[in-house]
Amino acid sequence: MLAEKWVYELVIILYALSVIGYFIDFIQHNRKANKLAFWLLSMVWTLQTFFLLSQIFVKENFPVMTIYDGLYFYTWILVTFSLIINRLFRVDFLVFFTNLVGFFIMLLHISTRAQKDLTENGVRLVDEMLIGHITLALISYGFFTLSFIFSIMYLLQYRLLKRKEWNKKLWRLGDLSKLDQFSFVSVTFGVPLLMLAIILGIVWAYNSGDVFYWYDSKTLGSFIVLVVYIVFLFLRIVKKYQGRAIAMYNAAAFLFLLINFFLFGSLSNFHF
């Protein structure tokens, strides 16, 4: 069980990194990120296939007879389809969301199996999802903070240029286009991390034994934060918003993030 636990953890980490890579490619059309995500997902598929074959030939059990095994086989199918689609076609939207769903199903399989077995390592694996949830959420907040700082620097630089205040501060703040791009890239990294953190949090909550409420203030606030930054990406990519307008939106989005972190966190019974 201990070796299996470590393999499951490796699969989760590789799968999460693959989802992030596909998201970056989906947003920025980054072929390097797509290639890396493909090979990470291939490693996930290899590990999953190894366990699937061991179930069939060693334990002589085709893993579809229970809900727990069915979830694992379902995830394997999704990963297989995703690899085929990514290799033969160029459908970024489908590949990303297929892997996002697959990652969620994989977590459900691992957590439900751990709870079913009720072993020390199994329960510990579920508790480690809580650590992953908190860690990924804080890292995503770090990227959003960087994006906010870049936006503030952009607005300050824009104001100095507007007033034609040619001084050392102007040159030390950096180029407007680079500040705008850095802000965008930071959000691009932050959104998938927060998305994965929320998924981990939901799976852990349903297996923690505690009472979980969808309408909890911090839970709702986290979903709204995610939506707010997804809207940022939509405005930036689809609507082609750039410059001062998107910088102002980003600053407002970060203020809501702070409200969710401090105010909604203190009002939340579940998270407290």
Image (spheres, rainbow, N blue to C red):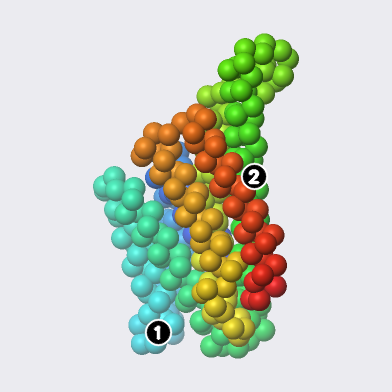
Q: Residue at x 64, y 56 (%)?
A: 259
Circle 1 sits in a helix, a strand or a loop, which is it?
A: helix
Up-down: is 92 above or below 260? above
Neighbourhood count class around disc 2 (C-alpha, 10 Å): few under 14, some 14–19, many 20 upward:
many
Q: Residue furthest left?
A: 89
Residue 208: horizontal and vertical position, in percent?
A: 61, 81
Amino acid type, label 2: Thr
Residue 152: horizontal and vertical position, in percent?
A: 63, 34
Does label 1 or label 2 sit earlier along the sequence? 1
Q: Residue at x 67, y 65 (%)?
A: 265
Residue 80: horizontal and vertical position, in percent?
A: 34, 62
Amino acid type, label 1: Ile
Numbered label attached to residue 67: 1
- From the image, tell me which residue sits under label 2: 145
Residue 3 shows in the view: no
Circle 2 sits in a helix, a strand or a loop, which is it?
A: helix
For this rendering, which residue is in front, 231 or 17?
231
Whether tag 1 and tag 2 are in contact, CB under 8 A, the answer is no
> Which quadrant is the C terminus positioned in?
bottom right
Q: Residue at x 60, y 66 (%)?
A: 218
Numbered label attached to residue 150: none
Gap between marks 1 and 2, in whole Å? 41 Å
**Closer to the camera: disc 1 or disc 2?**
2
> Which quadrant is the N terminus positioned in?
bottom right
Up-down: is 225 above or below 89? below
Rendered image quadrant of residue 200: bottom right
Rendered image quadrant of residue 213: bottom right
